[in-house]
Amino acid sequence: MPAPAIAAVLFDLDGTLIDHETAADEAVAASFGARADSPPLDRERVVSRWRELEAWAMDRYLAGEVTFREQRRLRITRLAGECGLGEWSDERADAWFARYLTRYEAGWRTYRDVAPTLAALTAAGGDLRLGVITNGDADQQRRKLERVGLTSLLRYATISSEAGAAKPAAQIFHTACDGLRLPPSRVVYVGDRLLTDAAAATTAGLRGVWLDRQGAASRTSVPRISTLTEHAPLLAYPVGD
């Protein structure tokens, strides 16, 4: 029996469509080096630790242990303490994070392979629907889509803070499919994290594709691409109305 035709292609957002890491790296380095009385900046250490703290704090947020604002405070107060800047009040943490966000948002950019890939998928014919499934705060994630000009192209957005579940839980993938009124077998999902994105989508019944931008050595049974322009695995089956 032939596989059912693809009717939708959904994407992860940060690390797949938007270069979150570069924007965050440059923003935290600039924010720590902005004051003349700041201690000498070990940029590599600060950037690396910021990435670790972001993952740790976001995991706590997605688990419902802290609010979105609280996970932000956790990240900067922990980093400030480790850098010898003492204990920070919530007010000081919020003020620092506001300055960081200004720099971070100014750095939002799509990867260079995003525009040609979406153009090719749009031109593929049929009634192919395009969208995103992303973890995070809905206001911020929707603002990203709007800022980089993707809102009109990716009309279907499922975001964890609205869906009541976060990747890798199957529920968020099924919520997206329900919103599309499609069975999971007719939906492709592309993301840059093997377990959280591609493998989780596959377990949920979608056709998961791993966007391995870093060329990881991990072995996997799910389709793997190194750039979005290698989109043949996305259309491995006929596109249907």
Image (cartoon, rainbow, N blue to C red):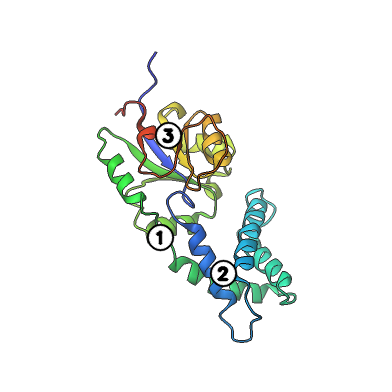
Badge 1 crowding class, 10 Å Cα cut-off, few under 14, some 14 to 19, many 20 or more, is: some
The spot of residue 120 in percent (x, y) is 28, 42
Q: Residue at x 41, y 45 (%)?
A: 227
Q: Secondary structure at mark 2?
A: helix
Instruction: Indicate the secondary structure of the residue bearing disc 1.
Output: loop
Quarter of the rendering containing residue 25: bottom right
Asked whether the viewer can see residue 204, the reply is no
* Residue located 36% across and 50% down the image: 114
**Which residue is more in the foreground, 224 or 88?**
224
Q: CA distance from mark 1 to mark 3?
A: 24 Å
Of tags 3 and 2, the one toward the viewer is: 2
Q: Secondary structure at mark 3?
A: strand
Residue 214, above or below 222:
below
Q: Is residue 76 above or below residue 33?
A: above
Q: Mark 3 belongs to which amino acid?
A: Val
Q: Is residue 80 left or right of residue 44?
A: right
Q: Amino acid at mark 2?
A: Val
Residue at image location 51% in from the left, 58% down from the top: 21
- The numbered disc on residue 201 is none
Q: Residue at label 3? A: 188
Is residue 35 something that shows in the picture?
A: yes
The residue wearing badge 2 is 28
Residue hosting label 1? 109
Q: Nearer the viewer, mark 1 or mark 3?
A: 1
Marks 2 and 1 close (CB-CB < 8 Å)? no
Which label's residue is closer to the chain start, 3 or 2?
2
Distance from disc 2 to disc 1, alpha carbons, whole Å, reads 16 Å
